[in-house]
Image (tube, rainbow, N blue to C red):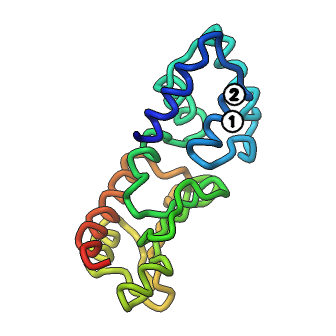
Amino acid sequence: MTKAAQMDKLLDAHHAGINSSDLIAIIRRIFNFDLETLQVSPLPRDVLDAFLQQAAGSVTGTEVRRMINETFAINLDALSALEQARISLYSKGQWMLQHEQDLFVVHTGTDDVGVSIYPTAYYTEHAGTAQLPQELLDALISLGFACDAEARTCSYTSPHGEPVPDAFKGQTMKAVMAAIRTVSGHL
C-alpha cells in the first residue's frame, strides 16, 4: 500500500473529524517527517487549523496533500510515488526519504532554490565508483546542472533566487530514476 493510500485509510478512520494534531501525527507516522519543524510563517499547525476549520473537520487525503503542497511546497503524492525508487531525498531541513539501499541523494535547501545530486555510500560501495553514471551526468547537464567530478556531485541553483518549479523537479527526478533503472540491475 502506498503512503498516500495509508494516509487516506487513516483519515477515513477519523469518522468524527480530525484536528491539526492528528494530521501532524499521521504525516509524521507515514512520511517520517515533522511538519512542525518547518521554519515558516504562519506556523504549520495554524495553517492546518484554518484549513480544517474551513472544511468543518472533514477532509480527504487528496485535499490535505494538495493543501500541503500548495502551502509548504511538500508534495506528499510525489513522495509516496518515490518510496521504492532508491532515491534519498533531503529537503526542508530533514530527510523526506532515506533507505539503506538507496543509490543517489537529492539534497535541496530549505527554500528549494538549489539542489545537489550525489551518490550514496551504498552506490559507491556496490558500483565500485563514487562517480555518478555518465547517463545521469549528461541528463543533469542538459537540465542546467553544473557537475563537479572531483566533488562527485551535480548542483543547480535557480538563476533568479526563486524556488525551482515542480516541472523542473519532475524532470530532475525522471533523470535520476532513468539512471537507477540502468544501474540497479547489478546493485
Q: Amino acid at mark 1?
A: Ala
**Is 14 located above or below residue 30 in the figure?**
above
Residue at point 33%, 72% (across, down):
141
Q: Which image quarter holds the C terminus?
A: bottom left
**SS under mark 2:** helix
Q: Which image quarter holds the N terminus?
A: top left
**SS under mark 1:** helix
Residue at point 39%, 86% (across, down):
131
User: Do the CB atoms of the residues marked 1 and 2 lie less than 8 Å apart?
Assistant: yes
- Label ID, residue 25: 1
Q: Amino acid at mark 2?
A: Asp
Position of 61 with respect to 182 (left or right) is right
- Label ID, residue 55: none
Spot occupied by residue 20 in the image (x, y as percentages of width and height): 71, 25
Spot occupied by residue 168 in the image (x, y as percentages of width and height): 38, 53
Hey, which quadrant is residue 14 in on the image? top right
Q: Residues within 10 Å of mark 2 (few under 14, many from 20)?
A: some
